[in-house]
Amino acid sequence: MRKTLIATTALIGMTAVPALSETIGISIPAATHGWAGALNYHAERTVERLSEANPDLEFVLTTTSDPGQQVSDLEDMVATRNIDALVVLPFESEPLTGPIQRIADSGVWVTVVDRGLTQEGIEDLYVAGDNDSFGRTAGEYFAETLDEGAKVVVMRGIASTVDNERVAGFESAIEGSGIEVLAMDHGNWNRDTAFNLMQDWLSRFPDIDAVWAADDDMAVGALAAIDQAGRTDEMFVVGGAGMKEMVDRIRNSDPTVPVNVTYPPAMISTAIEMTALGLTSGAPVSGEFIIASELITPENAENYYFEDSPY
Amino acid sequence: MNTATLRQTRRPKVNLAVIAPVVALVVLVLIGIAMNPNFLSFANVTNVLARSAFIGIIAIGMTFVITSGGLDLSVGSMAAFVAGLMILVMNLLTESMGGGLPVILIGIALALFAGLAAGFINGILITRAGIEAFILTLGTMGIYRSLVTWLADGGTLSLGYEMREMYRPVYYGGIMGISWPIIVFAALAILGEIVMRHTAFGRHCAAIGSNEKVARYSSVAVLRVRLMTYVMLGLLVGIAVVMYVPRLGSASATTGLLWELEAIAAVIIGGTLLKGGFGRVWGTVVGVLILSLIGNLLNLTDFVSPYLNGAIQGVVIILAVVLQRNTGTAR
């Protein structure tokens, strides 16, 4: 009698242990460019931190270099690891909407990061950056710092929705400030293109007060051209996305690189942490979470500097 | 009487064909002067020449490859890979050797050797394994591009600060304000023109491109000459990289993107025949300058929407070639 009771409790205990532990599957693009590299770095760091703080949580992290492989990864996660929640940054929205919907329908919690799906209402939680705010934050800094009649040049990225939203945000922020945009052209998020473009603008305009480079890779190219022309003291350059080298210059109060605007790859951490929070505490986390772009200044630069990050 | 009129009508035609690229260049320069007073400033002229140097140096080698009936699509990726490799090794050596001039010299030697080796691989596979140049170099283009992405772990490879400062003068320094890339480009162009015009090698290239069988029967070492053109192009890619790395001190997956097409376009604008058999290095130099000037002019003016930059370049390329086609048949 007693023996059976113990045996039963033991049995219940045994089945209870796997029920208590929750598994979170994470699927993100492989490190094919700087920003994605940082995404991987932050995802790994967060998984490490959460596993330590919460022994009941288990993680499956996969990185993929094409949409097809990502679909297979997701299927494997569901079939072999029996995940309770999924954090996914879709490689492409269109081909992944269907597979993610099937996973959501099977009762798995789904968190989608940055790239939205083509169908609404599939995901439980949506975490993304804010391109409008990315441009607006830079624009607001320009409007505050520069005098009326100040002359600026704007380096855009590759012609795309992301770029258009950013530039629209920037333009609306400087509207009415009296700042004159001398020229606006595509630097294609590329250092070399930005270098040539900036060289030509420096030949063309005798007075430039500031450069908005809309991305740190372009800022690197622009800074090299300005340095070559010996006009470093004349203007400042604001990039974006918080590249390590730029944050370091801000931290050291470099007058040429006064601030930067974030489009944090660490948003993957936000998504994983919130998903884990929802699973373990029952606190409501469903809905949308849009991460505003923040201004990195010499005062707060230390918080944005990640020594080991590849970006 | 009859022959006299024929000669009169033909002579200006031929002249126009030969000087067509030069005419295009002069027209672009005149437009530039009219549109912006800073166009002829020393800074702008040296900027344009220096940035032309990378593609220019590669295009000189490409002239020989195309003249002998070949093609190389891998040069842009090859440049990125060699640049990545050079930066990686220089950073490693800085750690172990503590930097200094030897590291830079080893870096330069490595870049030249890597370019040479990459060109040799292209050449040997095309000539000995008999793979179509277009397909083979399309393959190596993908391989080198992936390799540099892999080396950089998806991000950017940057030269250490100390080395960057020391190596910087190779791009920004020079003699009497003329920077090194311009000097090297000019020297190589002159050398290339001499080799093309006044050596057996140059004439063999044209002979092979014109008719490979006839060249072979004329006891031209066809395979060796063609191999040499790819090796030479690889070495020139290495030289271009030696000039490129000190500019921004970095390489990434987007380094050298589309350089191969710009180099090929420059060669064709310059009057070299895409199907081979005739090439001229000075024309290639003019072609490179035309391409750089279009970009420069578009940046110096608000004349057209930046969305249309590519369209303007396309129109100029086609026009420059159309001007020469009249002679292509006459010749």
Image (cartoon, coloured by chain):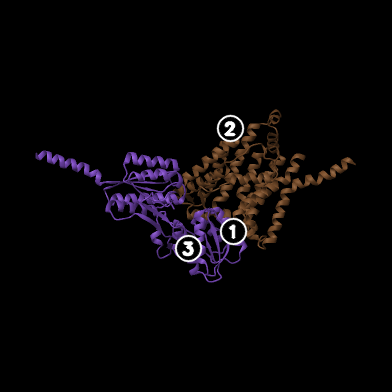
Chain drawn in brown: B
Amino acid type assigned to the residue bearing label 2 in the image: Ile
Does residue A92 appear in the picture of this structure? no
Task: Name the spot of residue A71 as percent of width and height, x first.
Answer: 41, 41
Report which quarter residue B32 is drawn in.
bottom right
Q: In terms of depth relative to the viewer, which is nearer, A82 or A39?
A: A82
Q: Distance of mark 2 from mark 1, alpha carbons?
A: 42 Å
Name the residue carrying label 1. A199
Label 3 to label 1, Cα distance in Å? 26 Å
The residue positioned 68% from the left and 35% from the top of the image is B209
Q: Nearer the viewer, residue B152 or A33?
A: A33
Q: What amino acid is at disc 3?
A: Arg
Q: Given contact means CB atoms under 8 Å apart, are the residues at marks 2 and 1 in contact?
A: no
Residue A60 visible in rendering: yes
Q: Position of residue A162 (x, y in %)?
A: 49, 55
Q: Nearer the viewer, mark 2 or mark 3?
A: 3
- Residue beneath label 3, please? A136
Label 2, on which residue?
B131
Secondary structure at numbered mark 1: helix
Query: Is B18 on the left-hand or right-hand side of A102?
Result: right
Which residue reaches farthest right? B1
Q: Which colour denotes chain A?
A: purple
Q: Is the residue at mark 3 from the same chain as the one at mark 1?
A: yes
The x and y percentages for residue B322 are 71, 45
